[in-house]
Image (spheres, rainbow, N blue to C red):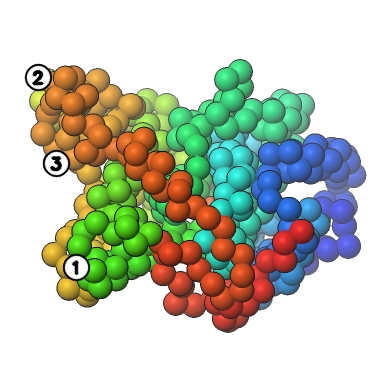
């Protein structure tokens, strides 16, 4: 049930776009707007070409093609995972009915909203990362940054396709808005808080791709379950690309920790700033920041909207089909984090309204594996130091803990105590200035900046000293 991808078209696709001239024309008229957005808000470093992966198919094998391409000529295409003609809705009140190939009128506004929120994050991250090319620690890292950027651009295409194909005029208007809102803009910021934060340096970039992009992975996982089949198939394919973004974050932090550990051992000191590396205490503060703002992305502990989305079949749970329950949850309860008499505690709520908490817990468990991995690096270097995820209530701006101040170990603080000590736990101006001072570009093949270890493997079987990027 899949159409062979057509690369002779202006817009590569496997959705048989040429059979729908109206839709094709609408997308072709959005394309120049996308390109001018990319020119003005995308990567600012001039390059001749970059060794990029381009999605060319959706099958298990050979779905991507690697080559040096000028970024402006990247073939942003529309790819949906193969259709399963027998697919049934897996949860909610429509469980067991055939998956929807069209948007039911009663869910139109909610589905559009979900697609717009997801779509808004994709170009936002490109905007946040636009100046990082100027300070890349190696050509390998520079290439990975651009790979993430072009794929976030493709994810925008994925959402815009759905808006154009299934939501008529409103959808087309929303697609325009996705290019008009900008990360950090005073007048028209991006929808979610973490996507208006800066990504000013590469430590932030690795933390962002580890923690914030990982939120994206979990959101896509819930939309992959959607009864609206085109959305499900789109997200399934996006998750395939997302795996590379996760790898960039995970191994990026690995390599920073590895370099720091190496210098701590060599020089027998915690203070590696003198040798051009990033002290563990600074890494911990960056981690605290990115983790806590990413927790906020999952929303409040309870949400009736999300309960309604689930019941309607719009948005499922992470790994819905592996859950051993009735996939309706109507009579079930669960415990969620809550403020109880001013103290951090738990409260019982209907399972349906607690679904944000359920997703956040899955995400936290995943984040724990990253920290364990980084601690293994410290351990094998023979160091007693360890990194840790801060307490769930630390530095929260959304949900039950938004109104309180909490230390990374979970201790409740007064506002004064928080003010006095926050510099121990969140990146300070001194930290940021120091990290920024390390951000000197290294563009020679096979060389790398002082603050990070080289990767264990290159891209697509190429060595680390490959000419991943030709500068312009
Ligand atoms: Fe994405
Ligand atoms: Fe991503």
Question: Where, by quadrant of the figure, is residue 124 drawn?
Answer: top right
Residue 259 spot, x, y in % from top left = 35, 67
Residue 111 spot, x, y in % from top left = 57, 33
Q: Secondary structure at mark 1?
A: loop
CA gap, disc 1 and disc 3? 28 Å
CA gap, disc 1 and disc 2? 47 Å
Name the N-terminal-most of marks 1 and 3: 1
Residue 268: numbered disc: 1
The quarter of the rendered structure image containing the C terminus is bottom right
User: Is 22 placed left or right of 146 in the picture?
Assistant: right
Image depth: mark 1 or mark 3 in front? 1
**Residue drawn at 20 percent across, 62 percent down:** 269
Q: Looking at this view, is 118 or 198 the one in front?
A: 198
Q: Secondary structure at mark 2?
A: loop
**Residue drawn at 76 percent across, 43 percent down:** 39
Residue 409: numbered disc: 3
**Residue drawn at 64 percent across, 28 percent down:** 181
Number of numbered discs on residues: 3
Q: Looking at this view, is 445 or 187 the one in front?
A: 445
User: Is 250 placed left or right of 357 in the picture?
Assistant: right
Name the N-terminal-most of marks 1 and 2: 1
Q: Looking at this view, is 321 or 269 the one in front?
A: 269
Residue 289 spot, x, y in % from top left = 33, 40
Question: Where, by quadrant of the figure, is residue 6 drawn?
Answer: bottom right
Image depth: mark 3 or mark 2 in front? 3
Q: Would you name the residue on which mark 2 appears?
A: 341
**Residue drawn at 13 percent across, 64 percent down:** 384
Assess disc 2: are there few (<14), some (14-19) or many (≥20) residues with their C-alpha within 10 Å of its C-alpha: few
Name the N-terminal-most of marks 3 and 2: 2
Q: Secondary structure at mark 3?
A: loop
Mark 2 and mark 1 in contact (Cβ < 8 Å)? no
């Amino acid at each position: 049930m899949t159409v062979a991808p057509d690369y002779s078209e202006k817009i590569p696709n496997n959705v048989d776009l040429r059979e729908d001239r109206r839709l094709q024309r609408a997308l072709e008229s959005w394309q120049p707007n996308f390109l001018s957005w990319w020119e003005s808000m995308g990567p600012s470093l001039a390059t001749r070409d970059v060794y990029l992966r381009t999605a060319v198919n959706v099958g298990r094998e050979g779905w991507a093609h690697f080559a040096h391409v000028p970024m402006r000529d990247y073939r942003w295409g529309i790819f949906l995972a193969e259709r399963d003609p027998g697919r049934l809705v897996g949860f909610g009140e429509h469980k067991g009915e055939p998956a929807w190939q069209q948007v039911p009128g009663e869910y139109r506004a909610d589905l559009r909203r979900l697609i717009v929120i997801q779509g808004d994050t994709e170009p936002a991250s490109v905007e946040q990362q636009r100046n990082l090319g100027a300070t890349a620690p190696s050509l390998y890292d520079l290439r990975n940054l651009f790979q993430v950027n072009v794929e976030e651009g493709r994810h925008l295409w994925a959402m815009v396709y759905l808006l154009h194909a299934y939501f008529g005029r409103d959808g087309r208007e929303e697609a325009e808005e996705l290019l008009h809102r900008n990360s950090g803009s005073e007048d028209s910021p991006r929808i979610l808080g973490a996507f208006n934060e800066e990504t000013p340096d590469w430590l932030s970039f690795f933390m962002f791709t580890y923690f914030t992009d990982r939120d994206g992975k979990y959101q896509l996982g819930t939309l992959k379950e959607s009864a609206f089949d085109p959305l499900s198939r789109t997200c399934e394919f996006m998750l395939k690309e997302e795996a590379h973004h996760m790898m960039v974050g995970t191994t990026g932090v690995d390599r920073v920790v590895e370099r720091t550990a190496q210098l701590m051992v060599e020089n027998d000191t915690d203070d590696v700033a003198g040798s051009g590396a990033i002290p563990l205490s600074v890494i911990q503060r960056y981690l605290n920041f990115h983790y806590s703002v990413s927790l906020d992305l999952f929303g409040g502990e309870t949400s009736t909207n999300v309960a309604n989305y689930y019941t309607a079949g719009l948005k499922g749970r992470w790994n819905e089909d592996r859950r051993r329950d009735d996939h309706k949850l109507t009579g079930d309860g669960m415990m969620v984090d809550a403020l109880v008499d001013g103290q951090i505690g738990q409260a019982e709520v209907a399972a349906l309204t607690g679904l944000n908490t359920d997703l956040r817990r899955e995400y936290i468990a995943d984040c724990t594996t990253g920290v364990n991995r980084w601690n293994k690096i410290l351990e094998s270097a023979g160091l007693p130091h360890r990194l840790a995820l801060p307490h769930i209530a630390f530095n929260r701006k959304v949900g039950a803990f938004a109104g309180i101040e909490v230390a990374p170990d979970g201790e409740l603080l007064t506002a004064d105590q928080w003010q006095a000590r926050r510099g121990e736990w969140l990146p300070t101006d001194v930290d940021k200035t120091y990290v920024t001072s390390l951000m000197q570009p290294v563009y020679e093949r096979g060389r790398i900046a002082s603050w990070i270890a080289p990767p264990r493997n290159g891209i697509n079987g190429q060595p680390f000293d490959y000419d991943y990027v030709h500068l312009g």
